[in-house]
Every structure is written in structure tokens, then in C-alpha cells.
Amino acid sequence: MNWSSFKYLAHQGLHSLRANRLMTVASIGVLTACLILTGIAGLFGANINSLVAYLGDQNETVVYLETDLTEEQIAQVDTAIRSMTGIASVTYMSKDAVLETYKGYMGDSASLWDGFEGSENPFMANYRVVLEDLSDLDAKVAELEAIPGVAQVNPPTELAGVFLGIQKAVNIAAWSLVVVLVVVSVVVISNTIRLTVFSRRKEINIMKYVGATNGFIRMPFFVEGMTSGFISGCIASAAVLGGYALVLYFSARKLSGLWATVIGASLLPMGQVWYWVVGGFILFGVLIGSLGTAISVRKHLKV
Amino acid sequence: MIVFENVTKVYPGGNTALKDLSLHIRKGEFVFVLGHSGAGKSTFLKLILREEKATSGRVLVGGKDLTRLKEREVPYLRRNMGVVFQDFRLIPTMTAYENVAFAMRVTNIPERKIRTRVPYVLKLVGLGEKMDCLPEHMSGGEQQRVALARALVHSPQLIIADEPTGNIDPELSLEMMELLSAINSVGITVVVVTHEHELARRFHKRVITIDHGHLVRDSEPGKNGWGVHSDEAGDEADAPLGEVRL
């Protein structure tokens, strides 16, 4: 294909977008709506995932030490725990630190603990271990229990099960929704483009009779489909990112207390999502636009 | 130019459109293909345009066996023939110039050639002054001439006109046929498919009559008015497309 033909075909594709305004608006509108719904489902899933992961990270495995350990033995336990893999964080709580924590919980009644200081302290020194991945919990608990000087390991087994369950359910639900919306988008878009192609079947027919190759006939439709997809991707990106910016704004400004801590800490920041949304939407839009065109035009090329 | 050798065409569903049809149309001939509705004329055209494939037998156009032609070669075959349809098949949103240029553009011809060739061909069919008119602002005869200009723009060696006078009044029909005769006079083969016996009779050209898929008459004007055509096609029938230039 020479340059002047390419220019002509590209121009024809763009001209057709303007000439068939109503169809163009319908096609862009449908694809934009599908992209927005897909984006909302994807972002919702990713954020719930992040929220569950955040909540899961707050659950610590408590490793109690034997009461009669020397400073040297505690140091050995410390080294053994910290050298383990798959550990997100390790915090040592001495007996005194545990007592202070409990005093804190009691508030005004903290004085009740006054008689339990020094050698009377009933608490056990312990390590608060946060695992990187709760699914490793059983193996890590066994590893911790095997360290000499460790009296007992209290893993958050039930909570881990709950969080892993929620995470799995949310992932399945969100991605299923995304898959359904992608299929709906392909069907709706190919039907919309089929209408465009149908309305121009006469033109295609004439092109065939005057000796146009199938590639030549397809080209303007591809330009049209891809441009519609690109425009839809841009509009949907702007809408979804605009909505997400509002969510981030309100969560930062309007939420307080526990909600602010939990939601604020787990919402994915804009810097981490915008390129996925923009890139994904534009790529997806262009792909759907060209795929829909390929499916729709084929039928009318058999002349 | 066109050879049909024992061609039979049966459509899916069992409708037999052509039965064992054999004929030769020589290079430079002017031929009417006559027949009533449903006689098999459209199938005859579709086989020449390679819109359909023969169920059995061979169809040769310009020496090329269309029954063996690959799909991707079909556009190149069609570039060597010009087709004029009864319903003109002009794109309503394009001017006369654009409609003719369109046929050149779809075959990758550079723009500078289009700019010189299209006005020339439009002037040839008497539409030099109407190049910028849309089809809706033109009469039936003028639209038919735009369609003819489009068919001629590639300098084809074969012009096929499907009921070219079907949508225009008798006076303009005559004008159209005279134009086709003029085109034929420079060596271009012209095949006019029609159901109008009177039209064929008036122009004293070879007439091939098809009825119920059979060739029932192949007559040439001459000795005794309308005599049975003797096949003298010989090697000329296989002459390649693309020698005479309009």
C-alpha cells in the first residue's frame, strides 16, 4: 500500500466517524460504559484486596518465651526469629513492656497492676511476629516452635482463615465481574460496529466490484474502530480516575477514627493505579474496537 | 476474452441456474446476453465477476481460469473489467468525481494520476461540467454515465453492463447504448446483459439468449439478419486482458 492510499484510508476512517455521528456516539457510549463498569469492578477488587491484606497484616503471631531465659538465650531466640524468611516484622515485648501495655488498656484503673512489677510480673516476654503471607502460617508456626527457648506460639489461625477466605472471595467476585463485562463489551461493540458496517454494505459492495482487496476495505473500518476504542478509553479513564480521586479525597477528609486508619491505610494511592487504568482502558478499547471491526466486516467481504 | 466450457451452476438448496453452458466471446466483440427474469443471466454475470464459482465446467476470462483463481487474486481480475449496474451503485455522499476517483483509490493508484485521469474519463462520457454534482442532483442517465466512467477509469478490456437501460428512459437508453458502441469501437469488449429484446434487435450485434440456464440461441447479425453464431473464437478467446487503452 502506498503512502497516498494509506493517507486516504486513514482519512476515510476518520471521516466516517464524523459522517456516521449517531453510530459513533452510540459505539463510543457503549464501550465507555463497559470500560467504566470494568474499571470500577477492577479497582473495587484491587482495593478490597489491599484492605484485606492490610487487615491481615495487623494480625500478629505471639511467640512466648520461657520465663527463665538469660539475656544471652533471649538474644539467640531473637537472632533465630529474625533470620527466618517470610517475616514482615518482629517486635520484642519484654515482661515489663507487656505489663505497661496492660496498664494502658486499664486506663484509670491501671493502679490495679501496681503490685505486679519486678519479680512479681506474671507476664511472659514475647515476640510479636507478622508474617508476609498468612497462607504460610502453619509452616512458620512449626518453625517458631522449634526454636530453643520458645515456650508457646499463639498463631491467629482463625483470623488468618477468615482473611484468606475474604480475599479469595473478593478476588473471584471482582475478576468474574471483569470477565463478564469484557465479554459483554465485545458482544455489544461488535454488534454496534456491525450496524455501522451494515449501513455501509453498499459501499463495501462497490469497493469489491471495482477491485479493492479485503485489506483495503477493512482498513477504514479498523481506523474507525480503533479511534472509537481510543476515545472510549480516554473518556472512561478520565471518568474512573476522576471518581477514584473523589473517593481518595473524601476518605482523607471526611473519615475519622478507625475508618480513617483502616480505609486510609489500605486504599491504593492514585500513583499506583492511574497508569493501569489509562493504559489498560486505551489498550482494551483499541483492541475491542479492532476485534469488533474484524468480526463485523468479514461477513460483508464475501462478494 | 470470455470462454464458458460446459458450465453448470447449482446453488446450495438445489436450484440449477446454468446447465452445461458453453460459449465464446471474442476480444473486441459487442455481445448482448438476453434472457427473461430467472433465465440465468445474473449467474452468468456472477461467474464472470467470480462472485460465484461454477459447480462444474470452466470459466475463462482473459485467459484466466476463474474456477482455479484464488480468492486473493479476484480483486486483480476485477480491476481489468468495468461493470455498469442497472441501479448505478454510486455512493450517494460522493460527487461524480469522487465516485470515479474512488474506483482508482481502492486500487492504490497515486493521487496525481487520479487528478488527471478522472476528469478525462468524465469528459469522455459527457459529464465534464457535472464533476462536482452529487448523484441525487443528477438525472438517471447522468448517473448511469458516472457509473460508466467509473467502469472505464481503469482502461479495462472488458465492460459488462447489467441491464444498463433498466432505470433510464428510452431516449437516454439509446444514448447509453451509443456510448457503449463507441467504447467498443476502440477495441474494448462489451457484454450487455438485458431482458429487452427490442434493444438487442435495434443494435445489430451478436445476441446470446439464455433460458432456464441453457444457451438457446447464439446469433450474429450479418448474412441473413440474425444467423446462428459459428464459433471462431480460436486463440483470440484466450487473449489476455489489458492491451487496448481508452
Image (spheres, coloured by chain):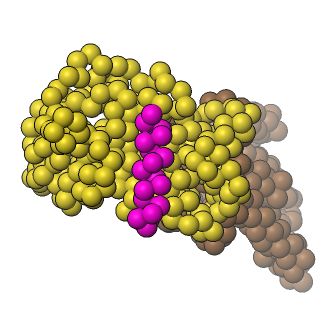
Residue at point 21%, 61% (across, down)? B37
Residue at point 64%, 63% (across, down)? B134
Q: Which residues are magenta?
A: B169-185
Residue A285 in picture, x, y percent from top left:
63, 55
Residue B25 in picture, x, y percent from top left:
27, 31
Q: Kindly indicate which chain is depicted in yellow in the rendered structure.
A: B
Residue at point 66%, 40% (across, down)? B120
The relative height of residue A29 versus residue B188 in the rendered view (above or below) is: below
Determine if residue A156 is in view.
Answer: yes
Q: In this rendered view, identify the residue nearer to me: B197 or A171.
A: B197
Left or right for B220, reference B239: left
Residue A240 in picture, x, y percent from top left:
74, 67
> Does B174 appear in magenta?
yes
- Which corner quadrant of the image does residue A253 belong to? bottom right
Left or right for B14, reference B140: left
Q: In this rendered view, identify the residue nearer to me: B158 or A181.
A: B158
The relative height of residue B36 versus residue A275 in the rendered view (above or below) is: below
Q: Kindly indicate which chain is depicted in brown in the rendered structure.
A: A
Left or right for B1, reference B177: left
Determine if residue B67 is in view.
Answer: no
